[in-house]
Amino acid sequence: MSDNKAKIKENFKDIDKKIIVLSNKGGVGKSAISINLAYYLAEAGYKIGLFDADLHGPSAVKAMGLEKETVKSDGEKIMPLQKGNLKVISMASFIESEDSPLIWRGPMKMKAIQQFAGDVKWGKLDFMIVDCPPGTGDEPLSVVQLFDGIDGGVVVTTPQDIALLDSRKAVNFLKELNVPILGVIENMSGFKCPHCNKNIDIFKEGGGKKAAARLYVEYLGKIPLDINVVESMDKGLDLFKEFPQTPAALQLNKIGKKIRESLKVILKENGK
Ligand SMILES: Nc1ncnc2c1ncn2[C@@H]1O[C@H](COP(=O)(O)OP(=O)(O)OP(=O)(O)O)[C@@H](O)[C@H]1O
Ligand SMILES: [Mg+2]
């Protein structure tokens, strides 16, 4: 094992389960799902780390309302930002301004991921959730290669016919790298009209479910288009605290429970 991998292994020794969230297409809701899954699990009492592996388009810090906070060091390691039970590290905390592009090639990206993994004081976590940029490029590959085992991969897609094509690449990426697949989530699935209460399938319906069946992986559920998802991310709010009864939060609850149960992480304090 390389020195870097050994260092990461040592730094991750108190992390119970690691989950990677990916998709082939951009803008399908990976970050929304990673962040809200993190909130859901933190709310349930778990200790969570959110690892924002999207180096070019980091969104976790702003979406959690932590963009004004600076990352500090304890003299030895970088301290992640923290919101309750939830720790987060993101490239957004290290770039000069929101407008500065990150112009890096593969090896530099791998180095950054190495540092987020090996040099950040993550401490004891029940779950680490890794939010990836779209596609199956340098960042998810570095994460899978550098981390000492990923316990589960979540593939996010939208409901259109293209979902199958989109999910296939992400699912095959996980299969080829021997990452156990937790399942496919169909996001932006349906929208309840606030005026007439009828459901409108803006991006059609069922693509994620069909893709999961065709690829022989679990279907974790669907999340509707919901203005409160956008609102909570734009304002840095916790969806479950602010809008617990909103349709997306209710669905995310079910999906979070499935993931929690399939990874069998028992909360010692209250047996949840
Ligand atoms: N279920 C939903 N209902 C309404 N808006 C949503 C939903 N899911 C995500 N969004 C919004 O859609 C936009 C894109 O979502 P998000 O940033 O999570 O996608 P992504 O897959 O992470 O994108 P990227 O590929 O750029 O990383 C955001 O503004 C987010 O708030
Ligand atoms: Mg994203």
Image (cartoon, helix red, strand yellow):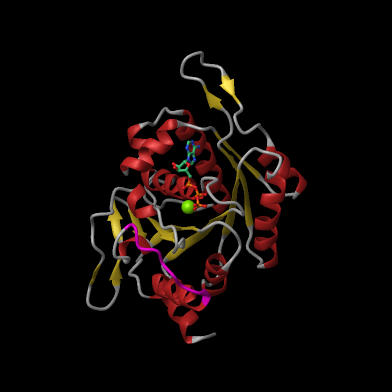
Q: Which residue is drawn at 70% across and 66% down?
A: 176
**In the image, is 19 to the left or to the right of 216?**
left
Quarter of the picture holding the N terminus: bottom right
Q: Residue at x 29, y 60 (%)?
A: 97
Q: Which residue is drawn at 55% across and 53% down?
A: 263
The answer to which of 230 and 43 lies nearer the viewer is 230
The answer to which of 143 and 103 lies nearer the viewer is 103
Magenta-colored span: 98-106
Q: Main secondary structure of the magenta part?
A: loop
Q: Where is residue 60 in the image (x, y as percent from the top left)?
A: 38, 53
- Magenta run includes residue 104: yes
Q: Position of residue 164 (x, y in %)?
A: 71, 46
Q: Which residue is drawn at 47% across and 72% down?
A: 109
| Residue 64 seen in this snapshot | yes
The answer to which of 248 and 41 lies nearer the viewer is 248
Q: Position of residue 11 (x, y in %)?
A: 40, 74
